Image (tube, rainbow, N blue to C red):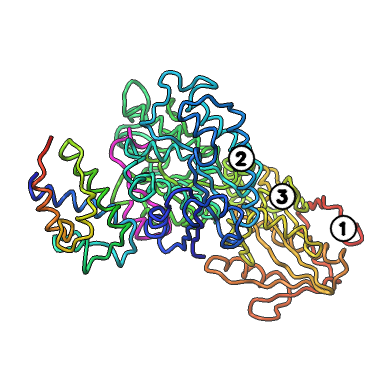
Amino acid sequence: MDRERALELIYEAIDVVNQQLPATQRLPRDPATVIVGTGGSLDSLGIVNFVLALEEKTADALGRSVQLLMPEWLGADDGPFQTVERLATHLTMLRPA
Amino acid sequence: MRNRLYLIADFNADTFARYLANTAMPDADVKVAPFGQVYQALTGPGPGTDWPALVWTQPETVSDAFRRAAAFEVVDPAQALDEVDAFASAVKRFAQHARSVFVPTWTQPCWERGYGMLEWRPRVGVTHLLARMNLALADALAAEPTIFVLDAARWLAAAGPRAVSLKSWYATKTPFGPAVFETAAADLAAALDGLGGRARRLIILDLDEVLWGGIVGEVGWEGITLGGHDHAGEAFVDFQRALKALTRRGIQLAIASKNDEAVALEVIDRHPEMQLRREDFAAWRINWADKGHNVAALLREVNLGPESAVFIDDSAVERARIMNAIPGVLTPDWPDDPARYRETLAGLRCFDAPHLTIEDRERKGMYTAERVRKETLATAGDLETWLRSLNMTVSVESLTAANLVRATQLLNKTNQLNMTTRRLAQQELQQWVNEPQNLMLTFRVADRFGDSGLTGIVGLTFEQETAKMTDFLLSCRVMGRNVEETMLHAAVTHCRARGVSSLVAELTPTARNAPCLAFLERSGLTRTSAYQFRWDVQLPYGCPPWVNLDDRTGAVSTADR
């Protein structure tokens, strides 16, 4: 998956989770947006909902199931979910079916 | 008033609450009962009688028989139906302490195949059992005016194969995907709008490329695309049928079109495939004037506010004009392809109303009669001659079970000629009228053009020597025909029969009820403060001589009149 497509999928998942957030807390569609860790505005339910939405969209794009809901990633400040940028890099490493 | 909703669910409803409060009903106050404690929440105190609630459960939570049936055990369907009945009873008891209650139907994931080809076999199929449970639930709650069963199967169908996510269930105890909540939240918001009297009642339509294909001014009525062996022509006919169907729900149609009126009406009168004829339209403005002005004029003619109207036009420019000129009018994006017109219309949630009365079903005829009535006004010369020519009868009835639904509907959606804009749920209105010091009079209006139905309400509270007018409201359909004066006459007559000495009417000003203040100012009542008016009940308040008053309450004698 190329980086542009990865960013598009992440932004689509952000759109899903933004519907659950007050206007003032919505996540910007920006590579620097923090998803998990210091500076992030999602609570634990919001993070899980975001990851589940992204899993579905990524699975559709790759034509295979994808496992992104990994507790060790969600709790780490330096994991792939820290920012949109890092998450996009992680998605580019996933291979299609 | 700020929207509010109390959620009771057997799953984690926090995600749904977030959708409601941040997307479907921005800034709504949404409270969530403790997760999984449905019966405890139904029997607990609840957040208050002015809170609507949603009770969303899974079938296996409510019915152990269903849970076992889904595991392919042999069960007696009667046991499942008994469990449904127990659940319905709990919901009914809870509803006595809530403003209204919404209960989604029970659903199964589409990937749950049960017994396959045996799924609709009675006493075998899980789907068959679930359908019986849903019907039993709907039947058990049917007589409750404040409980509404919502079709959750449609929410799941709209969401597609990922409507139910086991992963979401395992991770967050939320079984449904975001798309289910999106549709459910939109439906709930529409239902709350309907309960709040905010359902739309008028569709204003363009003609060319909306009701038919082509520009009739260029191709003539014989040359337009409508019906025939043509997919676009069939789509236009189908769209017209859908519009006509809405008129049977009390939705009115009007036309705002840039055309020569005679040319456009020729299509409506003569084209054999037209499904909508002149009598289907409450009013029209077919000319070359600005559509903003035409839509405003139509609203004035049918006496409805912008918040009651929907504007449908194929031109993005005209839609933008209306959005800018009259922002209260709902102006949906409209597809280019006529094959999508019908589904786009059906997708509008703005017509949902909590009740469907005889008046709703007959409203098309009422508006047509009103158009003819106004045409006679233009030829009558003076107003009195016209009023006399109407041969109007106003019937007064007490609030009864027979007119309670319509009275509640009128109370909750009338804005302009409404003195206090008091909103009450049907149950609250019934409770209010049960108090011995309270009286509610309802008014039906008929004339030689037709029956306008129950269109007026006067509420009175008797306090020793004084009667306080709690409600004075009249449908915009019959405003300006001296029904207002007739209602005051009846109110004074009933006050005299109850032996009070004065009648006090105090207006609560709103953004919409200036017409009511204007009426009170010219009514002849004595103004005692900015918004308060008084009448000495010993003095007769005259009934307009051209109105035949038929008091069916049995509460007043000839002497009182």
Would you say residue B527 sits in the magenta stretch?
no
Above or below residue B128? Residue B492 is below
**Quarter of the image where the C terminus of chain A is located:** top left
The mark nearer the N terminus, 1 or 3, is 3
- What residue range appears in magenta? B319-343
Provide the residue designation for mark 1. B556
Q: Chain of mark 3?
A: B
Tag 3 and tag 2, C-beta contact below 8 Å = no
Count of numbered circles in the view: 3
Residue at the extreme right of the image, as rendered = B559
**Quarter of the image where the N terminus of chain A is located:** top left
Q: What secondary structure is marked by label 3?
A: strand
Above or below residue B39? Residue B265 is above
Q: What secondary structure is marked by label 1?
A: loop
Give the CA separation, mark 1 to mark 3.
Answer: 18 Å
Q: Residue B508: x, y in percent?
A: 61, 71
Closest to the observer: B132 or A93?
A93
Answer yes or no: is residue B287 visible: no
* Disc sitting over residue B407 in the figure: none
Q: Residue at x 41, y 30 (%)?
A: B238
Closest to the observer: B352 or B324?
B352
Q: Residues within 10 Å of mark 2 (few under 14, many from 20)?
A: some
Provide the residue designation for mark 2. B362
Q: Chain of mark 1?
A: B
Residue type pointed to by label 1: Val
Q: Residue B23 falls in which quadrant of the image?
A: bottom left
Provide the residue designation for mark 3. B444
Q: What secondary structure is marked by label 2?
A: loop
Q: Residue B117: x, y in percent?
A: 42, 18
